[in-house]
Amino acid sequence: MHIRRILAHVIVTASIVLAADKQRTLKPGWNLFSPDQDVKMGQEYAHEVERQVQVINDPALHNYVNKIGSRLVGAIEGQKFPFTFKVVNDPSINAFALPGGPMFVHTGLIAAADNEAQIAGVLGHEMGHVMLRHGTNQASKANLIQIPAMIAAGIFDRGGLTGTLTQLGIGLGANSVLMKFSRSAENEADLYGARLVHRAGYNPVELARFFEKLEAESGKGSAMTQFFSDHPNPGNRVKSIQDDMKFYDRKNYETASTTPELTQAKSIIKRLPAPPKRTAQGSGSAQAPQGPAVTTNVPEGFKAHQTTLYAMAYPSDWSSRPADDGVSATLAASDGIVRGANGQDDIGHGVILSFVKPQSNDINTATDELIKGLTQGNPNLRASGNTQSLRIDNYVARITPMQGQSSMRQGERENVMILTVMHTQGMFYGVFIAPESRWRVAEPEYRQMMQTLRFKR
Ligand SMILES: [Zn+2]
């Protein structure tokens, strides 16, 4: 085997660094989860992934990828997540990392790489998503209300996290908020990856080159589409990385066109049997029970939101956004959904409905826990007025009035009624929201909607 090692000399001179230039700082954004919860979540999802993909246990292949992985982990500065690296028998050119560190590398990625630095580059990019906690950051922003409620309900501490998150649509399925990154997250992951591979002694430019190569191929409709649907191209990858490299210490990167190990890995991959046909990734477990949908009386001017656990009437000119689980939903007035400052949708006039499994069967204890969670995620939200005990469809229920900052009307307050109903399947909750200026009309409408709630017997 003839291997030619090419030493690429990257010369960094002080003169190209402008005085005004400052290297971008990369650090994790706002997050409702703790780093430990990232780890726990990733481990749970990893089990789910491993049931659905074919992990290759070939020692040479496994060791090769883990050797690259450990070299990168060794170059991480500061606190590290517990990274693991597994090879998946899948010809598509892809790799993905779950929050907290589990990483899966498709055989197609190894087969397509020109050199080890390109594999390292993709791994470094994925590790950037993990270290900068992009998945849970995006999930936090997309689920401001539900996640704190679930944290408060103790769901994350008692396991069953993924099932509950699937309930919110935070699964691993198509367009999962955990896996589909924004362009700015992509750019951060590129820079993180570039700095990491540089510290590990790989040429960072290979990362950008590999992505460009994939981009060119995906235009031809090859197996690349999946990678770029999860990792949208932030544009000017090469330039962005080269600009960042001005700040790196000078290094002679060892760029091998190939190595005996890469050649060996590629030949092992060639001999692998075709992977089993894939089932839909991350189908997840729906929380909705089997059976017919619950029905309710629909007053004039209303329509029905029906699930197998409950039904409720709501104004006929509103829209509904049911979650994948078949239980949770957002119902909103035609102008009730607003694009928040963080680019995510916020609800200004409408209702969020869901079920949680509380630790306590006592409605007051369970509701207080839920509200504690809500106020953690929405610091502006405060109790306002007395709670009301009532029965809805013969179940024990409570209404808790609160006030917050309207996301619809700048500077205006909003009223929020939190309805909790203790059911045999868990606790139903509805968050009824409207700006103060609409409350005179909204409140009686909300009370009417509550009275149409019917539950599974
Ligand atoms: Zn990415």
Image: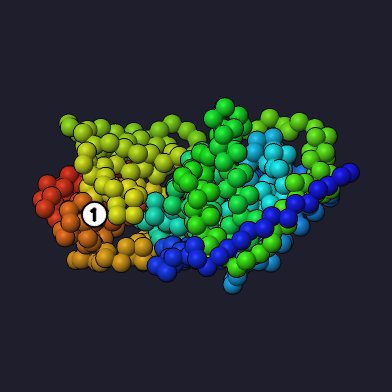
Residue 413 placement (x, y as % from top left): 17, 60
Q: Of residues 224 and 293, which is closer to you in this image?
A: 224
Name the image colouring: rainbow
The amino acid on which the numbered mark 1 sits, given as a three-letter code, is Ser
Q: Is residue 18 visible?
A: yes
The structure residue drawn at horizontal position 58% and vertical position 57%, both measured from the top left corner, is 194
**Left or right, residue 30 beside residue 78:** left
Query: Residue drawn 60% across and 45% down?
Result: 209
Of 437 and 96, nearer the camera is 96
Please, which residue is most extreme toward the bottom here?
78
Give the quadrant of residue 2: top right
- Count all numbered tags in the image, as a single digit: 1
Residue at the farthest top position: 220
Residue annotated with mark 1? 407
| Residue 212 drawn at (x, y percent) | 57, 41
In the rendering, at what x and y percent does residue 328 appear? Answer: 39, 44
Q: Residue at x 71, y 62 (%)?
A: 71
Q: Residue at x 49, y 43 (%)?
A: 233
Residue 61, relative to residue 364: is it above or below? above
Left/right placement of residue 253 relative to residue 26 reads right
Q: Quadrant of the N terminus?
A: top right
